[in-house]
Every structure is written in structure tokens, then in C-alpha cells.
Amino acid sequence: MMVAGLAQAATDSVTATVTVMYSSVSLNNVAFAYGSMANNTASSTLTLWSGAGIIATNNGSTSQFDIYGANTANYTLAANNTGNNYIHKFCNDTVDVCTGPPTSYTALTTSLATLDASVANGETVAFQLQITTPATPTNFAQQSAAVTIQASAI
């Protein structure tokens, strides 16, 4: 024999929220020329743009700005400028004194390096670059040395 009973139900709910983060960075100077340079010499962006450097603006969520370099068509980005190696360095002009290379300059590699660990929306980071040409190059064609700024939401 079955006994019928009253079934009771209870409900509850949970409310979940989400904040969509996005990364966006823009640069005020996206192309420039160091000019013609002799082998085994250095030049920087200090004399360009009245010392303000290249300005990276955060147009997204609070982000970390990373920076990295690249090989050119004929030169290898390296820690030394022997053979067809060239050196490219950066300096965060917002927090460091960049007026006298190599003071506060860090060598770029093809891997990420931190330019600034936390940049809020609308904030900017100024940076300078310095390049050193190969000491004994075998190719004298014009080269394009790309530098990339990457924003990652934090």
C-alpha cells in the first residue's frame, strides 16, 4: 500500500556577474627613420619628437604593456653587434631617465619584456629606442627593425 504525501519544492538562485576585459594600445609614432648610419654606430629616438619619445596609450582595460623586437631581412637582433647582428634597446621614459643611453636602456629580444606592468585606461607610457648597427655587416641594404608593443589585460 502506498501512502500519498504532499511534495514540497524549494528554489533558490544565484546571480553571476561578469566584466568583459579588453586590450587596446595605440602608438603616436608608428614609423620613423634613424637615418643613414655607419657600421658599428648607435642612434636613438631622443632627438626625434622633442624628447617626448614614442607614446603608447592604453585604450582598453588596465593592462600590462610588453615590448619585443625582431630580426630584420638581413640582420639578427642580438645582445652584441658582431657580424650581421644588431642591437636594439628600449627605455621606459615615463619612469626612468632615458636621456643618456645606455643608462636605463634594456636590450630587446624577440621575446616579451615588460615595458610597464600596469597601465590604466587612458594612461600613457613614453619610451625611447636605441639601435646599434652591425660591426661588420655583409649586407648594406636598408633594413626595417620592427618593435612591437603588446597590451594584455590584467
Image: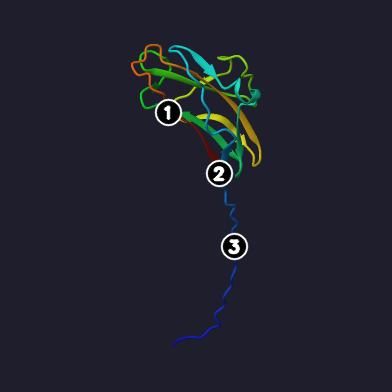
Residue nearest the observer in this picture, 140 or 10: 140
Query: CA separation, marks 1 and 2?
Result: 22 Å
Residue 56, compared with residue 106, is above or below; it is below
Which quadrant of the figure has residue 63?
top right
Image quarter (top left, top right, bottom left or bottom right) of the C terminus? top right
Which quadrant of the figure has residue 6?
bottom right
Report if residue 154 is visible in the image.
no
Residue under label 2: 23
Q: Amino acid at mark 3?
A: Val
Query: CA separation, marks 2 and 3?
Result: 29 Å
Query: CA separation, marks 1 and 3?
Result: 49 Å
Query: Looking at the rendered structure, which numbered label has been put on residue 70?
Result: 1
Residue under label 3: 14
Q: Amino acid at mark 1?
A: Ala
Image coordinates of residue 149 in percent, x first then y, are 52, 34
Q: Residue sitting at 59 percent across and 66 percent down? A: 13
Label 1 CA crowd tier, 10 Å (few <14, some 14–19, many 20+)? some
